[in-house]
Each structure stands twice: as C-alpha cells, then as structure tokens.
Image: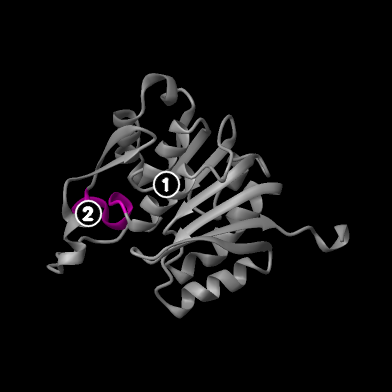
Amino acid sequence: MALVPYVENPLPPLSKLHNSSARFRFVDRDLTLAQDWKKLGVAAVVWDAAVVMCMYLELGKVDLKGKRVIELGAGTGLVGIVAALLGAHVTITDRQPALDFLTANVKANLPPQSQESVVVSELTWGEDLERYPAGGFDLVLGADIVYLEDTFLSLLQTLEHLCSDTTVVLLACKIRYERDTHFLHMLRQQFKAEEVYYEKERDIHVYKAYKLPAKGDL
C-alpha cells in the first residue's frame, strides 16, 4: 500500500527487486509482471508473499470460481491476476499513484475473456469506504500488506467494512518484527484467524480469517 522512495540496495537477496520484470508460471500460463522500484518503491515489485499466496490459491483449498474477490494493496497485481485466471470476479486495488502501472500489468497478463471479470480501482485503507459495498465480497486477499504500524487501524477498518459474516480473508505475510505479531493480535479482536499454510523456503505464512459475530448476535 505504501509508496516509498527508491534507495539503491546492493544486497544480492534484494537484487531481483530491481529487475524491470519478474516472470512466473501460474494456472498453466506464463506471466510477466513489470516492476519499477525506482518510481513506485514497494508498490511496484513482486514480493515473496504474493508468490506464496498464488501458490496457495492454486492448491484449490479456496473456491474461486465465480466468487467476488477484492485484493488490497495489490502492487504489481500478481495475486489478483491469478485469482481471475482461477475464475474469480476480482476488484484489484491500490493507491492512486500505482493504478496506471497496475492496470498495465493486468492487461498484459490476462486474456480478453478474463479481463472482463477484473476491475482496477483506487482504495486507500480507511478512506471513502462507501465506494465499496459493505460486506460485498466472498474473499479478501492481501499479500505482504502488514508492515506499517501506522496503517494497522485503517486496514482493520477496511476489512471490517468489506467483510460479511461469510467472507474469507487470506493474508500472506512474513513475520519480520514484533509489530507484525501485534497486528495479528489486533486482527483476532475482530476476526477468527488461523495459519493455514507456511512456505518454509521463503518464510511466508498464510492466515485465513473470518469476521467474528457481533456481541449482540452471540
């Protein structure tokens, strides 16, 4: 979600983030995602959490066919693209500065029949949420969107708005700092959340969450 300044980083593990593109194969298709760290920072590179989220979606443990899906902080759009290829109707969101870049990736990687089921839309967490239907999605996806503590409350507010009692939330993330664990604690105040997948090589966790019923409904 956050757009950060470009900083040259010589560390080999991060060098792939500076490539102009990243290539993957999901849903029997070769996908090429443009990257632009220098212009858009973290919003314009493919992070491991997105790759692992796509791996999890391909396992088929979540029904996507015909489902209403929204991706938060989509960045390059890889997760939303894969969800669409798996048959979902997807709203792929990020902040305004990333939308042109995101739209180009979606158009370049989806066949015409799948493009009809995708909308790219601006969403800054916690702002203008009435533009999106309350509880209007079957599945909410977020890959590596838990890293800025200042955004935790607005992210939770956004999840609360988008989710009905039957909505599934999937969050893929690397637990880097104590604050990331703190977010999971905050999430569990409003959602029932559990880890459903762990990719050891990339050290990525996937959490599934459901909205808790209101106290008056207990």
User: For numbered disc 1, what is the local secondary structure?
Assistant: helix
Task: Check disc 2 and give the amino acid type.
Answer: Trp
At 44% across and 59% down in the image, what residue appears? 145
Pointer 1 with pointer 2, Cβ within 8 A = no
Give the x, y percent position of residue 146: 46, 64
Compared across the picture, whether 29 is left or right of 94 comes to: left
Farthest left residue? 10
Task: Check disc 1 and give the amino acid type.
Answer: Cys
Q: How many marks?
A: 2
Q: Is residue 42 magenta?
A: yes
Colouring:
one colour
Compared across the picture, whether 75 is left or right of 38 comes to: right
Q: Is residue 199 above or below residue 150?
A: above
Identify the image quadrant of the N terminus.
bottom left
Q: Quadrant of residue 21?
A: top left
User: For numbered disc 2, what is the local secondary structure?
Assistant: helix
Crowding around mark 1 (Cα neighbors within 10 Å: few <14, some 14 to 19, many 20+) is many
Magenta stretch, residue numbers: 36-46
Nearer the observer: mark 1 or 2; the answer is 1
At 36% across and 51% down in the image, what residue appears? 51
Give the x, y percent position of residue 69: 55, 39
According to the picture, the residue beneath numbered tag 1 turns out to be 54
According to the picture, the residue beneath numbered tag 2 turns out to be 37
